[in-house]
Amino acid sequence: MIDLAVFDLDGTLVDSRRDLADAANAMVAGLGGTPLSEDAIADMVGEGAPVLVSRVLAAAGLDARTPSALEQFLEHYDTRLTAHTRPYPGILEVLADLRPRMRLSVLTNKPAHATDRLLAMLGLAGFFDGVVGGDTSCGRKPDPEGLLHLIDEAGTAANRTVLVGDSAIDLETARRAGTRIVLARYGFGYRFTGREFKGDEGFVDSPSELPAAISRASSHP
């Protein structure tokens, strides 16, 4: 049985593409660069704010090592955190369904302060027992330390845990930690060729499929 479901945030629980893109482009504009498309910026999300900022700067023709850029991005993002970001349709119902049956946690590469604010502002915080952001002592995914910390905190084991995410970073994190994995094909981080899969992954095309997919994950060796 699955005792713990750990969720990625951006692209899995919430659609944050536009707010991330708007904050990144506000940073770029302030530094005199060329704004990028929402899709281009969304393709750069997933490995934490410092990596996103570096990639955006390079793509916008700016120095990727600009010292103040990360601070500027975080300031812009803080004012736009939930301007357009919303839970994917059905996520609230899914969490309400799962909560009585297992512990739920969040593992994200988004900074902890922004993560906590976003979860609270969108009415999601009460569903989760543990939350680990990307700027904690656990490091950032695909380092498995954050996931292993949440497993230990929940008093369970890796083979009784499923990570729900949308990206190759999430897949690698689950494999390093020895947990099950369910991948959200609806997420903006889902970019796979198929060669990455071993046959023990679960997949969903909408949040409403998550409870059944998480239940099926317990049947994998």
Image (cartoon, rainbow, N blue to C red):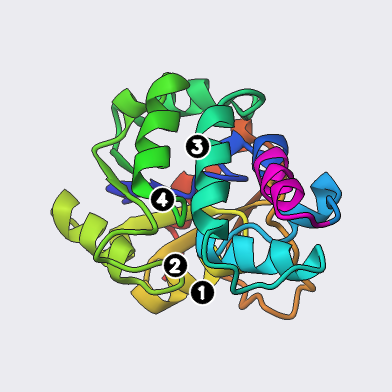
Give the residue drawn at x 27%, y 66%. Answer: 138
Give the residue drawn at x 68%, y 48%. Answer: 24
Does the magenta run of residues contain 158? no
Residue where numbered disc 2 is placed:
141
Q: Are marks 1 and 2 in contact (CB under 8 Å)?
A: yes
Mark 1 to mark 2 CA distance (whole Å):
8 Å
Secondary element at tag 1: helix
Please report whichever mark, 1 or 4, sits nearer to the chain's N-terminal start.
4
Please report whichever mark, 3 or 4, sits nearer to the chain's N-terminal start.
4
Q: Main secondary structure of the magenta part?
A: helix
x and y, in percent, of residue 216 in the image: 50, 51
Q: Which region is colored magenta?
A: 21-33
Q: Is residue 48 visible?
A: no
Residue where numbered disc 1 is placed:
172
x and y, in percent, of residue 83 in the image: 62, 23
Residue where numbered disc 3 is placed:
211
Split into 4 quadrants, where in the image is the C terminus? bottom left
Please report whichever mark, 1 or 2, sits nearer to the chain's N-terminal start.
2
Does the magenta run of residues contain 27? yes
Amino acid bearing label 2: Lys
Q: Are marks 4 and 2 in contact (CB under 8 Å)?
A: no
* Residue 5 position (above or below residue 146): above
Is 107 left or right of 58, judged from the image as shown? Answer: left
Please report whichever mark, 3 or 2, sits nearer to the chain's N-terminal start.
2
Secondary element at tag 2: loop
Amino acid bearing label 1: Glu
Is 175 left or right of 23, judged from the image as shown? Answer: left
Mark 3 to mark 4 CA distance (whole Å):
27 Å
Give the residue drawn at x 18%, y 50%. Answer: 154
Residue where numbered disc 4 is placed:
111
Q: Is residue 28 visible?
A: yes
